[in-house]
């Protein structure tokens, strides 16, 4: 298990470019299983979760060819269907959350999929009901082996399109249902579909492959099923979560940080969320500049009421950034309520920030009040463990701004979502050592 040793208090400055979007990468990689022809994908991030999914796809028979940094072709013309039932495959699925995105394409093209209950972040229950209810609506049969935590979904005939109203706007659930529906007979209508930029990108790539999808960008998708799909080329967007992480780092520790090629029109409400904490952000073309050092004051609502920052399905604020915003708020002037609605255990990392000297009241698993002291009460270095990707990067930010030296263990969690993060931050002036 690797650790980061962080010497706090070093200002950062310069230019950094975000990696390709992790969540989009996992979805479009799964979509390559829908055709026997080569699919080229560019700007793939070199991170643990994505690399593990690529390796898993290679092992099931996908031909993977690296053309350059982040540039790959995938050809699923000879899939080993027997391996999909092996103990090795199921064990690997159990440790990789992204493996869930293989279910839809495998069902659509080969008529069946088997997968173990997927792993990933420990942030509370992440139920699979939406995925399987959608596929059952398309005509598949579902079975769950409770003893072994194995899901099986199958159909003896081609899936058939239908109307469905999703019980929740699940991003991965929507992606799986879309990938299953593109090869189904007739027309599928999905209402209450997730409409995040990642879903939009998946739909655009599928349309390049020959799918017929309308309503892209809305929560009402119409999919006219086709007989088969063909090859295509696709470029992954910049990772909006990494962009938000760098804005937070620039606000906490920056002496002028430029974030290049952020895909500004795809960031939604993210820049505004930081501005509500008083963080100054300048938009320069497709770049963001975070001036510094900053003293920032939390805004209040128009009627003067207490500022609340909460997550919501797109185009609301992504839950992945609440951890970062919470750490930024510890050094603001004023107080803010952070309300994490979508996951039940994601705020439990704040006890580590409290140990560092942050003034935070954890009201319950979903709400925390952060009392900022305008940098008059500095955080102190501590020894910590990263529980998940986003809490891990939030603790790293806190350690970079703290007095003294911190140690963060289990940084493989951070590696799952951030490419060579210590090298990139050290190039800006940080002092982070991997041990």
Image (tube, rainbow, N blue to C red):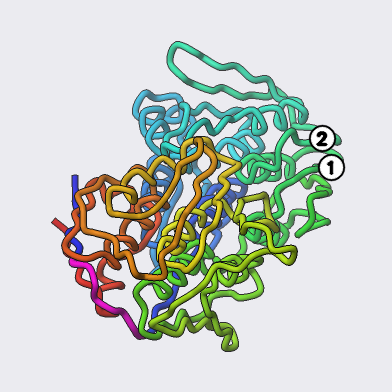
Split into 4 quadrants, where in the image is the N terminus? top left
Judged from this view, the residue extending furthest toward the top is 147
Q: Which residues are magenta?
A: 7-14
* Residue 278, above or below 3: below
What SS does tag 1 mark?
strand
> Is residue 117 found left or right of 387 in the rendered image?
right
Split into 4 quadrants, where in the image is the C terminus? bottom left
Picture quadrant where residue 402 is located: bottom left
- Give me the disc on residue 133: none
Identify the residue at horizontal 52%, vertical 59% (top origin).
335
**Could you classify mark 2 by the number of other residues whose Cα lies within 10 Å: few (under 14), some (14-19), or many (20 or more)?**
some
> Is residue 142 found left or right of 376 in the rendered image?
right
What SS does tag 2 mark?
strand
**Could you classify mark 1 by the number of other residues whose Cα lies within 10 Å: few (under 14), some (14-19), or many (20 or more)?**
many
Say which label, 1 or 2, has the lower sequence index.
2
Q: In whole angstroms, how far apart are the C-alphas of marks 1 and 2?
A: 6 Å
The location of residue 244, given as percent across then percent down, is 50, 66
Residue located beneath label 1 in the image: 189
Identify the residue at horizontal 79%, vertical 56% (top origin).
218
In contact (CB < 8 Å): disc 1 and disc 2: yes
* Residue 53, above or below 264: above
* Residue 230 makes an appearance in the image: no
The location of residue 126, given as percent across then percent down, is 54, 33
Q: Is residue 258 magenta?
A: no
* Residue 322 makes an appearance in the image: yes
Identify the residue at horizontal 51%, vertical 53% (top origin).
320
The location of residue 182, given as percent across then percent down, is 73, 45
The location of residue 301, given as percent across then percent down, is 69, 63
Residue located beneath label 2 in the image: 164
């Amino acid at each position: 298990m690797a650790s980061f040793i962080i010497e706090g208090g070093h200002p950062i400055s310069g230019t950094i470019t975000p990696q390709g979007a992790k969540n989009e990468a996992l979805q479009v990689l799964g979509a390559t299983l829908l055709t026997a022809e080569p699919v080229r994908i560019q700007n793939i991030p070199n991170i643990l979760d994505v690399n593990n999914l690529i390796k898993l796809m290679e092992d099931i028979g996908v031909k993977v060819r690296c053309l350059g940094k982040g540039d790959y072709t995938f050809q699923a013309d000879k899939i080993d269907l027997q391996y999909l039932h092996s103990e090795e495959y199921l064990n690997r699925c159990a440790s990789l959350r992204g493996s869930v995105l293989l279910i839809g394409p495998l069902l659509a093209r080969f008529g069946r999929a088997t997968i173990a209950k997927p792993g990933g972040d420990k942030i509370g229950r992440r139920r699979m009901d939406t995925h399987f209810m959608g596929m059952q609506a398309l005509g598949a049969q579902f079975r769950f082996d409770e003893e072994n935590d194995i899901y099986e979904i199958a159909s003896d005939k081609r899936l058939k399109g239908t109307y469905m109203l999703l019980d929740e706007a699940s991003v991965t659930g929507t992606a799986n249902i879309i990938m299953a529906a593109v090869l189904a007979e007739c027309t599928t209508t999905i209402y209450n579909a997730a409409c995040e930029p990642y879903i939009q990108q998946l739909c655009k790539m599928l349309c390049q492959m020959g799918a017929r999808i309308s309503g892209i960008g809305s929560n009402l998708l119409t999919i006219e099923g086709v007989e088969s799909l063909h090859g295509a080329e696709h470029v992954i967007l910049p990772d909006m979560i990494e962009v938000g992480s760098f804005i937070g780092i620039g606000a906490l520790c920056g002496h002028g940080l430029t974030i290049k090629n952020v895909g500004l029109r795809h960031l939604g409400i993210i820049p505004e969320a930081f501005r509500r904490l008083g963080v100054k952000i300048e938009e320069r073309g497709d770049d963001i500049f975070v001036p510094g050092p900053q003293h920032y004051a939390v805004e209040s609502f128009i009627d003067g009421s207490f500022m609340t920052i909460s997550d919501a399905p797109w185009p609301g604020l992504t839950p992945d950034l609440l951890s970062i915003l919470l750490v930024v708020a510890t050094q603001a002037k004023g107080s803010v309520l952070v309300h994490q609605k979508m996951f039940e255990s994601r705020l439990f990392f704040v006890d580590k920030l409290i140990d560092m000297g942050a003034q935070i009241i954890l009201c319950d698993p979903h709400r925390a009040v952060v009392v900022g002291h305008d940098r008059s009460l500095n955080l102190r270095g501590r020894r910590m463990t990263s529980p998940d990707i986003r809490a891990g990067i939030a603790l790293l930010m806190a350690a970079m701004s703290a007095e003294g030296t911190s140690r963060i263990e289990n940084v493989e969690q951070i590696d799952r979502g951030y490419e060579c993060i210590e090298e990139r931050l050290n190039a800006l002036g940080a002092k982070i050592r991997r041990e």
